[in-house]
Each structure stands twice: as structure tokens, then as C-alpha cells.
């Protein structure tokens, strides 16, 4: 399985089971976008049952200062 396929499976399983926090989701979404191409964010959103805006806003969380990202 390719890296992108691995990421896709990981995301779908974990988002549906709600086992990832927002920052971990953001990191995974960002890795998917970097590896697959940002045009594929719509496809990712559809695969995980979310709208594109949800995925995009999650990725934007990575712009927050590191100390805020690490808070629980």
C-alpha cells in the first residue's frame, strides 16, 4: 500500500471512531494534502464524511502557536 493509501485508511478509521484530537487530525489532513495534492482535500472530506470546510479549518489549526496546539 502506498503512503497516501495508508494515510487515507488511517484517517477514515480514526475520524469515524473519533479517536483523534483536533490537532492530530490537522496533522494527518495536512500530510494527506502535501502527499496527494491539495485538490484532493474535497475527496478526503467525502471519504471521511465531512465537508471540505471542516478539513480546511482543521488544517488551519496548525497555524496556532505550538504552546496552544499542545494544550489539552
Image (tube, grey):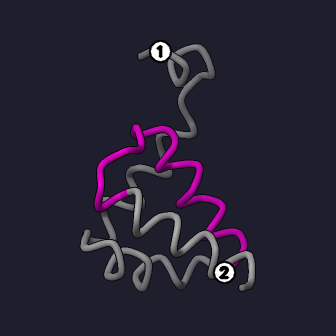
Q: Residue 72 lies in what quarter of the image?
A: top left
The label on residue 14 is none
Q: Earlier in the sequence, mark 1 or mark 2?
A: 2
Q: Main secondary structure of the magenta part?
A: helix
Question: Residue 42: x, y in percent?
Answer: 40, 81
The N terminus - image quarter: bottom right
Q: Residue at x 62, y 82 (%)?
A: 5
Residue that numbered label 2 is attached to:
36
Q: Residue at x 43, y 77 (%)?
A: 44
Q: CA distance from mark 1 to mark 2?
A: 29 Å
Residue that numbered label 1 is attached to:
71
Q: Residues within 10 Å of mark 2 (few under 14, many from 20)?
A: some
Question: Residue 39: x, y in percent?
Answer: 54, 84
Q: Residues within 10 Å of mark 1 (few under 14, many from 20)?
A: few
Q: Residue 50 lies in what quarter of the image?
A: bottom left
Q: Eyeballing the image, is 14 above or below 45? A: above
Q: Residue at x 30, y 55 (%)?
A: 17
Q: Which residues are magenta?
A: 15-36
Q: Secondary structure at mark 2?
A: helix
Q: Residue at x 50, y 52 (%)?
A: 59
Amino acid at each position: 500500500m502506498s503512503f497516501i493509501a495508508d494515510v487515507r485508511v488511517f484517517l477514515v478509521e480514526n475520524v469515524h471512531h473519533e479517536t483523534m484530537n483536533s490537532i492530530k487530525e490537522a496533522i494527518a489532513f495536512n500530510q494527506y494534502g502535501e502527499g496527494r495534492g491539495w485538490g484532493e482535500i474535497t475527496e478526503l472530506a467525502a471519504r471521511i464524511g465531512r465537508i471540505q470546510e471542516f478539513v480546511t479549518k482543521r488544517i488551519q489549526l496548525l497555524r496556532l502557536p505550538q504552546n496552544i496546539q499542545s494544550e489539552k
